[in-house]
């Protein structure tokens, strides 16, 4: 996919965002330092960060957790969050290591049928000097979903079926969508958030 950057300035994809992307928080810094101690390669650091967000944060819908985590600190500390929170966590880890990361979205069927309605799904775009921009999806794997770290051929969580009204947006945003944050903040629990997620950009 030809990605559409919100900003051509890579510094805009390295910033902290109060309460959402907080890579200077002590717990996030400890995790970042542990990643950096394992390798000096930006690519390998990005892969480790991706696997932390994908595998070490449980997807709240999969576990039927009632709790909503929003910011990176909360998602990483509680090891719980839906796709949006997991993408916030991955962005915080990457940005904290000086690796530009943005926010991407797809419109997917809620439960696999048109009758179930649609909701946005959140993932990330990452920039490495050797590859340019590419997308990663830290949603978390389960039977039928196999998202992997890949800098060439995308290996994302969901194949987008345009014939069913799903949309793969090419946008790479510098900040999470305000409509997404609003839905997360205003939903009383994760079960409500399942239906309150925005349907479009």
Image (cartoon, grey):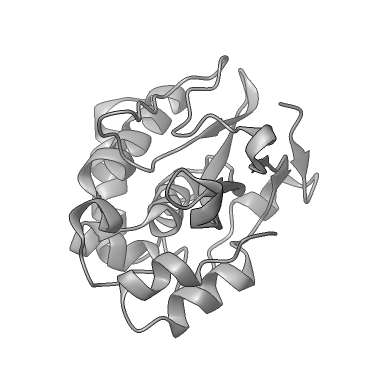
- In this picture, residue 6 sits left or right of residue 159: right
Please provide percent x and percent y for residue 194. Answer: 40, 65
Dividing the image into 4 quarters, which one contains the C terminus? bottom right
In the image, farthest residue toward the front: 115
Dividing the image into 4 quarters, which one contains the N terminus? top right
Q: Residue at x 20, y 65 (%)?
A: 65
In-front residue for pair 165/43: 165
Snapshot quadrant of residue 178: bottom right
Snapshot quadrant of residue 97: top left
Snapshot quadrant of residue 49: top left
Q: Residue at x 45, y 68 (%)?
A: 195
- In this picture, residue 170 sits left or right of residue 79: right
In-front residue for pair 88/169: 169
Q: Residue at x 45, y 23 (%)?
A: 43
Please determine whether, in this image, residue 56 is positioned above or below residue 131: below
Please determine whether, in this image, residue 171 is positioned above or below residue 72: above
Please provide percent x and percent y for residue 166. Answer: 63, 42
In-front residue for pair 123/94: 123
Q: Tell me how many marks there are.
A: 0
Please provide percent x and percent y for residue 119. Answer: 54, 57
Residue 137 visible in the displayed image? yes
């Amino acid at each position: 996919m030809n990605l559409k950057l919100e900003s051509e300035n890579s510094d805009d994809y390295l910033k902290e965002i109060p309460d959402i992307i907080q890579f200077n928080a002590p717990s996030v810094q400890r995790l970042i330092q542990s990643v950096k101690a394992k390798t000096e390669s930006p690519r390998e650091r990005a892969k480790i960060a991706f696997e932390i967000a994908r595998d070490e944060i449980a997807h709240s819908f999969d576990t039927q957790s009632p709790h909503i985590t929003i910011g990176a600190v909360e998602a990483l500390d509680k090891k719980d969050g839906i796709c949006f929170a997991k993408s916030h966590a991955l962005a915080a880890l990457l940005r904290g290591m000086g690796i530009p990361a943005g926010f991407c979205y797809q419109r997917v069927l809620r439960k696999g049928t048109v009758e179930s309605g649609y909701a946005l799904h959140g993932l990330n775009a990452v920039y490495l000097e050797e590859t340019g921009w590419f997308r990663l999806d830290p949603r978390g794997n389960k039977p039928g979903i196999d998202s992997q770290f890949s800098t060439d051929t995308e290996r994302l969580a969901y194949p987008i079926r345009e014939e069913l009204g799903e949309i793969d947006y090419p946008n790479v945003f510098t900040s999470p969508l305000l409509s997404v944050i609003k839905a997360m903040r205003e939903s009383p629990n994760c079960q409500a958030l399942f239906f309150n997620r925005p349907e479009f950009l």
